[in-house]
Image (cartoon, helix red, strand yellow):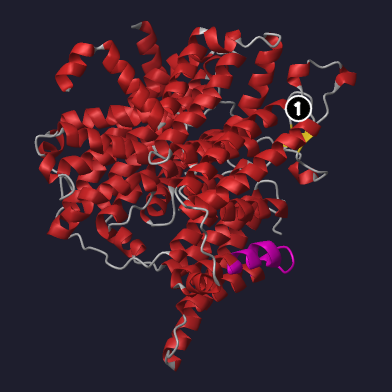
Amino acid sequence: MAALLQNLNQFFSAIAGFLTPVALFHVFWSTLLGIVIGALPGLTATMGVALVTTLTYKLPPELAILILICVYNGAIYGGSRSAILLNIPGTPANAATTLDGFPLARAGLAGKAMGIATSGSVLGSLIGMFFLATVAPLLGNYALKFQSFEFFWLAIFGIVISGHLTALEDPMKGWIAGFLGLLTAMVGQEGIHAYERFTYGTTELLGGFALIPAMVGAFGFAEVLTVMRSPAAEVVQEARDSIIPRLGEVFRYWRTIIRSGLIGTIIGIIPGVGEDIAAWVSYAAARRKSPEREKFGKGSVEGLMAAETGNNACVPGAIIPALTLAIPGSAPAAVLLAAMFIHGVRPGPMIMVESPQFVYQVVAMVFFSTLGVLIYGLTLTRFLLWVLAVPRTRLMPVVFVLCAIGSYAITQRTFDIWVMIGFGLFGYVLREMKYPMAPLVLGIILGDILDKNLRRGLVLSDGDLTPFFTRPISLVLWLITLSSILLSIEPARQALRRGAQAIRPGRARREA
Amino acid sequence: MLKADFLTGIAFILLSLYVIVESWRMPRLEHLQVHPLSVPGLVPAFLGIVLLVFAVILLVRSILAGGHRLGLSAEAARRVLSNPGNQRLLLTAILGIGYAGFLVGRIPYWLATGLYVFTFVGVFEWRPGMTRREHVRLGLAAGLLAVATSGLVTWVFQSLFLVTLP
């Protein structure tokens, strides 16, 4: 009880700390920018957070991270507007929103759909925020027990699970993307003996590929190419009905809201999976449990609520491992993590020892961004309709200009512009061949963790592999990793099924 | 997708072999008496081997499904190039690389940015058979956007964030 009161006290202190005109001004513009970025097809949350990171270099860390969280949360919400009005998800996280959002808009209920999306997003964020405030400190304290063996498996676990869940049709492509990311992280001076790997005398590569230019390329330039290649979006629906939802209608689906909020948060915590999967899984779970499942895909309010609650609950969820383990839960959280390092914040297992108040400041930041989403969500209609009407031929060159200058501005090297171009082209080709980007990005971040901890672990155990497999946390991590791989291989799946039937002959006979 | 898998399978096999060979060639640092299991090439070699396994599976899988029959011909290449989406893609990539890779750093930043935005809008919005009035309107729109983008980005990064522009 005392601990809970202390936590609440820290949370309210953090809230009070942001109740200044400057902080509120930053919440005001950055949430709006996030919503606009998210609403515009072709501008994703990852790209938005990466580009805005370049605008925050000169700001104090708390304000910089506040701005980035507002952009992140705003963008995931903003994507619902184009999903509802254009049938094009503004960000991949809003793909499930199109299924019911657009049919509602077509039926003349665009305002209602936007209101439901706003309610779902806000409630999802609040559920995720609750878990951020309660789980992050616990996980942070627990992470202090992690040693090299556990961090090694955490890196492999992240790549395998992220690869599996972001490429459900062909998990191997997800794993390949993840291992390509890990290999990318091998370039540059390694962290134990300071040996220069794969640099071939290029001084710019000594520090490896910088994450922000790589991500701006993979998510920004690649997105510009994708948008310009696809046919132009045409119809913008008008919203004639009320955008303010009725409370009764929202809370009628309280079970769906809580379930989707939980699913979104849990998927957020899993490394490198992200908001799009959170929305799809929440949507599928809601459909399975709903008494009105025949309405799903035809304009179901419950389906729309589930998708939007799930993706926004994932935002605070994805921040949990980023803060406590320095392992991002999603691609935008990966940029957020990089931005924290740039601003001198050191996320990771020591955060609850070194700066526990920062965790509560992040919770307060999520709260303010959610408040921003609620206010804009219930008031902005015409402005966003106008924004959505901007042709891509005028938007994309501006986006690309920001990609170029954003990559350059961090270290002021033209080399980083080439990194952005290289990763953009490479990312585009991989994307076209159905390789997901999230495991690639996660790999770039986890590469250093995997490298140092595998070698440190082997040195500590003097080459004995037993601790990698027998320490309790390692055991759980490698068993889940192996199961994930086995479950995606058809012969192994069949063998497992046969094995299960052999163990339960009675049930097998009944099924036969 | 099978053909693409066949080609990427080969590319990833070559990449992983390269990584494995390079990792093997990295120094063992015996003169520093470092632990043999902490040598710099260990982890890249491990990653290279895993990637090799995945790449071989990808290649074999695509060959079994007939992905090795690429069916390359001049006609197929012409079809790809004449697709309007691919043309837009190519043009976007050329304009982007031309601007960020070659113009930026060689001429003043504001000029490079203005030229890029103006050209981009002009190239993609121009249609054959446009009237003189439409040409003027397009030129004005592209020019305004170019001046606004170039001016604002230059001002924000140079004066507000104190970045020395390329």
Q: Decide if residue A427 is in sight here.
A: no
Residue type pointed to by label 1: Pro
Q: Would you say residue B164 sits in the magenta stretch?
A: no
Q: Decide if residue B24 is in sight here.
A: yes
Q: Quadrant of residue A25?
A: top left
SS for dot 1: loop
Question: Quarter holding the C terminus of chain A?
Answer: top left
A26 with respect to A233 (left or right): right
Q: Which residue is mark 1?
A: B40
Q: Residue at x 24, y 48 (%)?
A: A378
Nearer the observer, A3 or A21 = A3
Q: Residue at x 13, y 58 (%)?
A: A107
Q: Residue at x 72, y 69 (%)?
A: B107
Q: Residue at x 67, y 23 (%)?
A: A452
Q: Quadrant of residue A169?
A: top left
The residues colored magenta run B94-110
Residue A330 versus residue A378 in the image, above or below: above
Give the letter of the chain under mark 1. Answer: B
Q: Would you say residue B109 sits in the magenta stretch?
A: yes
Question: Quarter holding the N terminus of chain A?
Answer: top left
Where in the figure is residue B165, as x and y percent of width and height?
Answer: 69, 58
